[in-house]
Image (cartoon, rainbow, N blue to C red):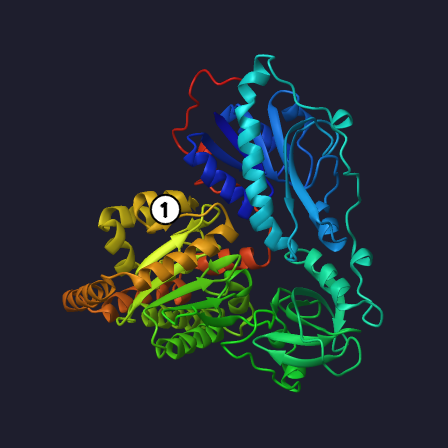
Amino acid sequence: MRILFLVHDFNSLGQRLHAELAADGHDLSVEFDIRDSVTEEAVASFAPDVVLAPFLKRAIPASIWTKRLCLVVHPGIVGDRGPSALDWAVQQGEIEWGVTVLQANGEIDAGDIWASRRFPMRAASKASLYRREVGDAALACVREALARVDAWRHGCWRPIPLAVAGGRGRLRPLMRQVDRHIDWRLDDTATVLAKLRAGDGFPGVADRLFGETCHLYDAHPGPPDIAGEPGACVARREGAILRRTVDGSVWIGHVRRKDSDVPIKRPATEAFAAQAALLPERPAALVRDHDDHGELRYEESADGSVGFLSFAFYNGAMGSEQCHRLEAAIAQVAARPTRVLVFTGGPDFWSNGIHLNRIEAAESAADESWRNIVAMDDVCAAIINLSDRLTVAALRGSAAAGGCFLALAADQVWAHPGVVLNPHYRNMGNLYGSEYWTYLLPRRLGPDRARQLAGGRLPLTAAGAAEIGLIDACFGSGADDFEDRMRARALGLAAAGDLAACVQAKAARRAADEAAKPLAAYRDEELAQMHRNFYGFDPSYHVARYRFVHKIPPSWTPRHLARHRQPGWRPVAGSAP
């Protein structure tokens, strides 16, 4: 079918649905919801069979839904209505939640029901649930709904009216900051975490730190045996600040200061640098308990043959200091006598490359961009040069830009079907990119396909990446199943009889590649291009970064998404209205 995505923004859910439905063979185009007249123009031009709305902030105009089939993806159970569905579910401790696909009508979230799915709730942030459980359920719902379109058109099937469907969902208002308010003198740790997790991503929880107004994000349980008054900031670690509760503590990883010259999300210790410097540091050991928060963690299999190094950086962004710590961790674990080393990234993201928020907040964005990309290259080189064992990049979460090519530095790359890859840089102001992509990508795809992929702008499913050879394997029914199977597969690699021969062949290939063209030459050539992006006369990167970081609403839909606006576009005859 021909499907027009109508979106407020091309967010993670929109990207995943777009990549999956494209792989299913549908003809897709995207239009940002800028104003009604623009949407009407897009519908008239593309003539879609279905208008799909995976992420909107306002109603579809009647001029559209009365003439075209419009399906809305709502992150709530049947009967749930309102703009804060997932926020309320997280904050109120729902045990089970779901996704519903409804047909747009004159009342928001009140249309007839085309499909629904439920899932058990994890103890996680709203943003994490949205990327994983909501994404899985939404994909299943959308596919089910699309499969019913033909029967609906022929009168063989009808969606279920909301009044008939029932369900325990109800209309709930927009969650306001008064609903999210934390009373540090009364709220226990579980309550504090629920409120912070419900606001994570957007809009955060309005509060005060060190007497200054700010919004809090990125919360994790802290140790229970911390001295201090409830609400007091008592320690710091890896960008986070530890804050006392009535019965324990929580780590606050990121904040947005209202009084800042650059009011964007930043690590808490950077946003309050002077105050945080006075707090005692509570460093995180690389090997520690799983409930002890920290960005880097290492563990080994029971037999010591496989090491697992995770780096759970918030939103997958890797700042200069984080890259330095990861590089040091790689050197530390490389001293262990493991035969296979698995890099697992974070549970929600493998990596999204350089840290645009920290760059934007720096005194010189160009200088910090340079420091950051050099540090990313150092991490990539550290993985490429691990010649005495096999390395695996196990993508538990999605990856984009430099994060994709960082994964390719490993010998093998694995991912589960829910992972979405954006293996290109061009969407950020036509960045050229580094992370040795000019070496790593042609090595996997050949020069022609490598240039084609790097010049693209669209998301790619993990299954699609495996099919073209960008990654080595896509397996598992979801994130949890992938985790179990990934560990078993890594143990199998370590126990394989030909492991020593594989390691020798790897070292020989690296030596041959180095003789043909030194790794440093690839790096120098890439960085020369990046220097032009950062310091040259074309400000495209800086403009794109500023708009991205400050979340400036788009004024138009990018042409690579809006196929109906590309030169020469003509609709194929025969599309049903």
Q: Mark 1 points at which residue?
A: 465
- Residue under the image location 39 percent in, 52 percent down: 423
Residue 129 point in image, percent of width and height: 61, 51
Relative to residue 378, is residue 66 drawn left or right? right
Indicate the secondary structure of the residue bearing disc 1. Answer: helix
Residue 258 vertical placement versus 397 (above, below): below
- Residue under the image location 47 percent in, 55 percent down: 484
Residue 397 point in image, percent of width and height: 49, 55
User: Can residue 52 be spotted in the picture?
Assistant: yes
Residue 277 point in image, percent of width and height: 63, 85
Residue 8 vertical placement versus 301 (above, below): above
Three-letter code for the amino acid on which mark 1 is drawn: Ala
Relative to residue 62, is residue 229 drawn left or right? right
Position of the C terminus by quadrant: top right
Q: Mark 1, residues whose alpha carbon is within 10 Å: few (<14), some, or many (≥20)?
A: some
User: Can residue 428 be spotted in the picture?
Assistant: no
Residue 573 point in image, percent of width and height: 43, 17
Q: How many marks?
A: 1
- Residue under the image location 24 percent in, 68 percent down: 519
Query: In this view, which residue lies farthest toward the right?
Result: 186
- The quarter of the picture where residue 541 lies is bottom left
Q: Quick one: 345 or 70, which is closer to the camera?
A: 345
- Residue under the image location 39 percent in, 62 percent down: 533
